[in-house]
Amino acid sequence: MLYNLLVPLSQDFGPLNVFRYITFRAAWAMFFALVVTILVGPRFIALLHRLKFGQQIHEDVLAHKAKAGTPTMGGLLIAFGAGVGTLLWADLSNIYVWLTLFVYLGFGLVGFLDDWLKIHHHQNKGLSPRAKFLGQILVAGLALAVLLHEPAYSSRLSVPFFKEFLPDLGWFYLAFAMVVLIGASNAVNLTDGLDGLAILPAVICTGVYAIFVYVAGNGNFAQYLQVPFVPGVGEVAVFCGALMGAGLGFLWFNAQPAQVFMGDVGSLSLGGVIGFIAVLCKQELILIMAGGLFVIETLSVILQVGYFRCTKGKRLFRMAPLHHHYELKGLPESKIIVRFWILSVLFALASLSVLKLR
């Protein structure tokens, strides 16, 4: 909003030209969202307490019984901070910004319904897997259909380390991109099992893609680093900044011992929008590395289920996702969280190095 209001005035007042810079607005969107989230947080948590929106704890995780009743749906707080930050600092005439917000809020709506049913029925079961999956398909399909009709966007796939190899997937790209969005959404959801475990890696991964999306939208940088150029997509870096700020603000309250949980409204929306931003900047395959922690957690579930079925009842891990395995081995929750955070930083640095290894 500030961009649309103040940039036209820059011809008469030169200092307002600073609002033309995406980096300036992304930084301020991050700071603004962080402050807003921290200021609003206490009243929001108090409201959740009054509404009795308490978390239902999984029966198999006995160590978490003390957390029963902790307010959930904290993802709404993240959405508020990120939404206000984006609307205030982004160029609201940019189609990519609105598509990103649509995906974020759409996946958030699916998560909200899931959380609401859990609270309403007083058990850790919300939407059926089929209903949740259909909701994710609907949101992802609508956003991607609009995206693929944008003249500046193509269905070519960027392959890391092979800069000249850009296969055109045609309409198969739609199915591929939907897998990216839905897979990322569910991966973050699986990781969200300990205080602060999912939010900081999500913030770090968003930071990685803030850089990727800015580079993809800048013709000079895209040419120099030999990455696909998508005109206009760099504006999404402002949303990334706002989401990072809101995420850090949420961590203020979600750090152990958590005062609030993000719920599915938070985890599904975060994962879905990170996947969409990866698609926007044509760095879909890098998400496997940038979101390495989420990939590991998801693989642990897939391996556990597969091994259980193949061996007729035996388990590969004590419990999946992986963080629960280490909990049952006796590691303190705080140690598991910090170690997983460290892994997220390493995955982020490795993914950024790919910008030069082409």
Image (cartoon, helix red, strand yellow):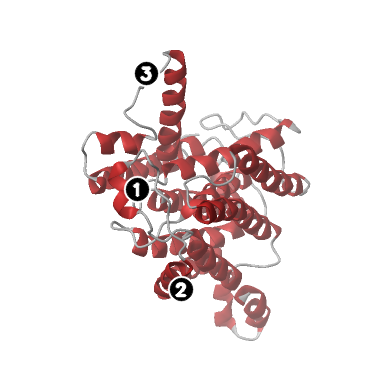
Q: Can residue 282 be seen in the rendering of this structure? A: no
Give how far across and how far down residue 219 sits, in percent: 62, 51
Q: Is 230 drawn above or below residue 105 in the view shown?
A: above
Task: Identify which residue is drawn at 31% across, 49% down.
Answer: 65
Q: Secondary structure at mark 2?
A: helix
Query: Compared to 69, does 131 lie above or below?
Result: above
Q: CA distance from mark 1 to mark 3?
A: 25 Å
- In the image, what residue type sits under mark 2? Val
Foreground of the two, 161 or 155: 155
Q: Of the numbered discs in the image, which one, if any, rests on residue 194?
A: 1
Residue 15 image position (x, y, % from top left):
54, 81
Q: Residues within 10 Å of mark 1 (few under 14, many from 20)?
A: many
**Mark in front: 2 vs 3:** 3
* Residue displayed at 41% across by 53% down: 199
State the CA–CA distance, disc 2 to disc 3: 48 Å
Q: What is the three-letter code of the residue carrying label 3?
A: Lys
Q: Which residue is mark 2?
A: 36
Residue 98 spot, x, y in % from top left: 67, 60
Instruction: Identify the disc placed on residue 295.
Output: none
Q: Secondary structure at mark 3?
A: loop
Residue at label 3? 314
Q: Nearer the viewer, mark 2 or mark 1?
A: 1
Give, as a three-letter code, the residue at label 1: Leu
Do we see residue 200 in this rendering? yes
The quarter of the picture where residue 63 lies is: top left
